[in-house]
Image (cartoon, coloured by chain):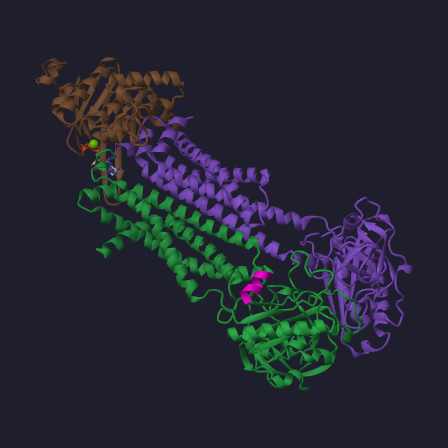
Amino acid sequence: MEFGPIFRSLFQNRARTWLIVLEIGLTLAVVVNCLVLIRDQQAQIGRSTGMDEQNLIAVTSVPFDPAFQEEGYSVASYEQDLREIEAMPGVRSVTSILQFPLSGSGSATGRRIAGSEDQRTTVPYFLMGPDAIDTLGVELVQGRTFEPGDFPDLHDDDEEQAEEEEDTDHVTNILVTQYTADKFFPDGDALGKQIEGNNNNVDTIVGIVRLMHNSWPLGPDPENLMIHPSHPVNNRQTRYLVRTEPGRFDEVFVALEPKLREVEEGRIVTVRSLSEMKGNYYSSFTSMNQLLGWISVLLVAVTGLGIVGMTSFSVTQRTRHIGTRRALGATRGDIVRWFLVENWIMTGIGIAVGVALTFGLNYMLASMGGVPQIQPPILLVSILVMWLMGLLAALIPALRGSLVQPVIATRSV
Amino acid sequence: MLTMQDVRKVYRTEHVETHALSHFSIAVNEGEFVSVMGPSGSGKTTFLNIAGLLDAFDEGTYTLDGVDVSRLSDREMSKVRNEKIGFIFQTFNLIPDLNVFDNVDVPLRYRGLGAASRKQAIEEALATVGLSARYKHYPSQLSGGQQQRVAIARALVGQPKLILADEPTGNLDSAMASEIMDLLEKINSSGATVVMVTHDPELANRASRQIHLLDGKLIDLAQERPAPLYDPSPAGQAV
Amino acid sequence: MLLYQLRLALKSIRRNPVLSTVMVLGIALGIAVSMSFVSAYYIISGDPIPHKSDKLFYVQLDSWNPDNPFSDDDPTEPPNQLTYMDAMALMESDIPTYHTAMYKTVMVIHPPNDSVQPTQEEIRMCFSDFFSLFDVPFDYGGPWDSAADEGPEPVIVLSAETNDELFGGENSVGRTLRLEDQEFKVIGVLAPWHPTPKYYDPHNGSFDFAEPVFMPIHWAREMQVVNSGNTSGWKPYDNSYEGKLQSEAVWVQFWAQLDTQEQEERYAQFLTGYAEEQRAAGRFQRPNNHRLRDVNAWLEFWGVVDPSQRAMVIIALLFLLVCAVNLIGILLGKFLSRASEVGVRRALGASRMWIFSLHLVECALIGIAGSVIGLALSLAGVSYIQRLFGVQLDNPLDMTMLSVGIGLSLLAALVAGIYPAWRICRIAPGMHLKTQ
Ligand SMILES: Nc1ncnc2c1ncn2[C@@H]1O[C@H](COP(=O)(O)OP(=O)(O)OP(=O)(O)O)[C@@H](O)[C@H]1O
Ligand SMILES: [Mg+2]
């Protein structure tokens, strides 16, 4: 191959060469950093939440019928709802819940090891009804799930107790995630231990869930969570979480609202899939990824077209040389090869410069926060794409160049 | 070496058809030095282009070194141009992005020779034209005469059997022109066939045979004149 | 002369239609991407209410747990909201020009058309000063008067979008609407109003839309409606509705407009006095620590602009840079490919300056075409970004941005053209006649 002469000829056209090199370099730097961001955010969206999120449906019931204000009406309706949903074909299990996971809004409270003088740390919590573990689809690694005895009596006078902090001097059996268990008891002996909140309300850890996300998966500790047994029912709003049998999601999803309104008409029933709530919660990521994706695609397109343009003019400018080469015995293939090799060298230098720029830009963006480190596979794939793009972009004008007739050499204009 | 029989070349543009060559026949023998003369527009360049396989023709046959070239593919034609023909242009046609060495190297590159043998051939060719010292110069740093000498080195570096030169001295003064002629004669004497177009009768007379073109037709003076021994020009006597 | 150059430039642009399009589109894209990102960023990070942002103050008091600071990250920081008691007490002051306590809640709205199902909507509970404080624009009617802040009159203000939805956009002032079990009279309808970011309450979604309904705050008590936003507490309290109102939990936001330095000082004194009063009464056991943050300080404290948005702006500017380099490269190639023509022109007497300006005219033409298309694309880009992020802007591209955009793109094209034009004007007159 004619590396030597091509190299020297590139050097003769320094400005053009450097412009292409710079353009390819900058493009690579921006694209890699965009991809790294996209990859990182995709990974956060895609990580396991511990739940059977594909089959979970979140239902909110907001009563407006004045009947709900009557004593005991809400509770009766709540119990009937649970029964009716459970009986629906395709439903695997149902539970009531006060705070939806992955939704961006939830509750948290302070806890410390019972009897200690530690500062309380914040622990997000869910108030959930019976069947919580099976409905969530999370994996219990130690202890047991809730038993009927863990729940406060639903027909007590104080039916709104679920809404806010627990009673004082009351021991509750709770479930925690492995993360939260380890946070309080790093030695792994959390089961059976107690933690306490304000005013001596004490929780006993009776079960440990391997992994589960709380309401803020993008918060500092998404797996920090405890689950309190409760019947979170009141006369303003009641929420259910429904887990469908695999493959029967759609069927249950459309049937839920009519079913609940059939049970009790005077209320607003909202049915959303957990995946949708998760999508909403992560929507800024998804939007940003879309933007970054577009930027990358447009950038590669602009650079590709730019190379087509620059090479085209370089072909025009060299029409006469091409004719001369042809007259001296170059085949069409030789001409195409010349341009491709020339381009290949420029792209190569551009990529080398680009790798340096990539790390520079990454360092700069990372110092502003929010941009993760460069993963080599992404860099390699981007390099390959840029390189192919460069070759492809040069191919079009090069093919046009190869059509130059040898007679051109003897024409003076 | 080169035989054309009833070759016709018509240029068609929107408004006119130009018969650049019609019923054109010629035979050039191996080792000959042929000069081609004729008024402007008479078809000299066209003839040379066809002879050099740079351009196609419409009718007739053309045999080069025993091969009927009208049937060759583009690729085969490239090979013939590269191996059998050396072209020298009026406007030199050096490639400005390449230095002298790389310019002379161009035809060798298409042969797949090793670096060492290429280097040797280039150095020899540059020595022949007396430009060994300037191999690193770029064309824009050379005078017209020097550029043409580089072009000649480029034409002869592959040791072609046929050298085609289209007004190689057209852009040069007479002293330089004479030097270029000396070079061509040297190449000719080492065995290559040379066909040269020129407007200068003095230079034309130094050739072993002169042909004239008029309106795309050949008038071969050699058939009318007995021998070059009687060539009246001083240059001719110098042979 | 210029006309001749213009004609030559146009001819040259037309000679390579495809590549000229590539150049124009390239620069247009560069402008569109950078403009829409910069303007989106400008809106996100900019001052949402420039003419009075330094007069509006978000009020914080330190009513928190004597044992623990409110925030582990910054122990000197008071709670980010007020207790209901404190907010109502602050409303007694007559120092601020305007002031309002407020919070967000949800209520069931029964549409006037019975065939439409009731919906649950967000409601902002506030005082009448809310509308003057934030310069909220009205299409019909106006805010309730201060008598209605306490009075028995059930009145509400609707947002433009809600009015469109419920009343088909007509003047609904005087019409009634049932929220929960109470009939309300519509007293005002807002013009479209989307403060971005939602600076008056960034606690619950900094880029959420403004609420669809505004209601005098005392009706919440009437209807026993609790807030639906962020609540933080440290002291257990009675679970009843009144219990929450009397509790130490913080869930109420408070804004005051203080026009003069003097007002500001007096108000600060008032807050100190209030805190001391409360301490004497057994509350406020932490060191005296109130905050008066103006709009920009408040937004900065909330960190509404996240670093990845800044990264996006840098990426968008790099995009413009690539487009500029791209343009320079193509122009250089184009100009150099006709070096011989320029050589002849130079030989025939064209001055360097003439050649230079001829080529700059060509760049300017490309720049103008690029900026026109670029601006059109920017509009599309901004609305795409808005849709993507669910943000609605009242004024996405204002005139300054527009003229800056046009200027910028023209400048970009000219700057991009300077080097190639300079290169080509330095072609020696004879050179390209000699060597080809
Ligand atoms: N590409 C072309 N298209 C149309 N007509 C052409 C073309 N090339 C040459 N001709 C015409 O063919 C004829 C022969 O041209 P040619 O170049 O062979 O002349 P020439 O003998 O070399 O003249 P000169 O001495 O001026 O170089 C001329 O009349 C010319 O106008
Ligand atoms: Mg000629």
C125 or C398: nearer the viewer: C125
Is A340 situated left or right of A112 in this image? Answer: left
Can see residue C190? Answer: no
Please provide percent x and percent y for residue C397.
46, 64
C323 or A193: nearer the viewer: A193
- Screen quadrant of the C terminus of chain C: top left
Q: In which quarter of the image is residue A21?
A: top left
Vertical comparison of C19 with A200: above or below: above
Q: Quadrant of residue C249?
A: bottom right
Is B32 situated left or right of B116 in this image? Answer: left
Q: Quadrant of residue A125?
A: bottom right
- Screen quadrant of the N terminus of chain C: bottom left
Q: Is residue A193 magenta?
A: no
Chief SS of the magenta region: helix
Vertical comparison of B4 with C75: above or below: above
Please provide percent x and percent y for residue C128.
60, 80
Q: What chain is the brown one?
A: B
Residue at 17% over, 33% down? B215
Task: Please identify which colour was used for chain A in the image.
Answer: purple
Please provide percent x and percent y for residue A216.
70, 56
Task: Please identify which colour was used for chain C in the image.
Answer: green
B231 or A222: nearer the viewer: A222
Is A58 situated left or right of C275 in this image? Answer: right
Vertical comparison of A144 with C144: above or below: above
Looking at the rendering, the stretch of residues picked out in magenta corresponds to C295-301
Residue lying furthest right:
A149
Which corner quadrant of the figure contains ligand 1? top left
Q: Does the magenta stretch include residue C299?
A: yes
C108 or B183: nearer the viewer: C108
Is C412 situated left or right of A358 in this image? Answer: left
Residue at 19% over, 29% down? B217
Please provide percent x and percent y for residue B112.
41, 21
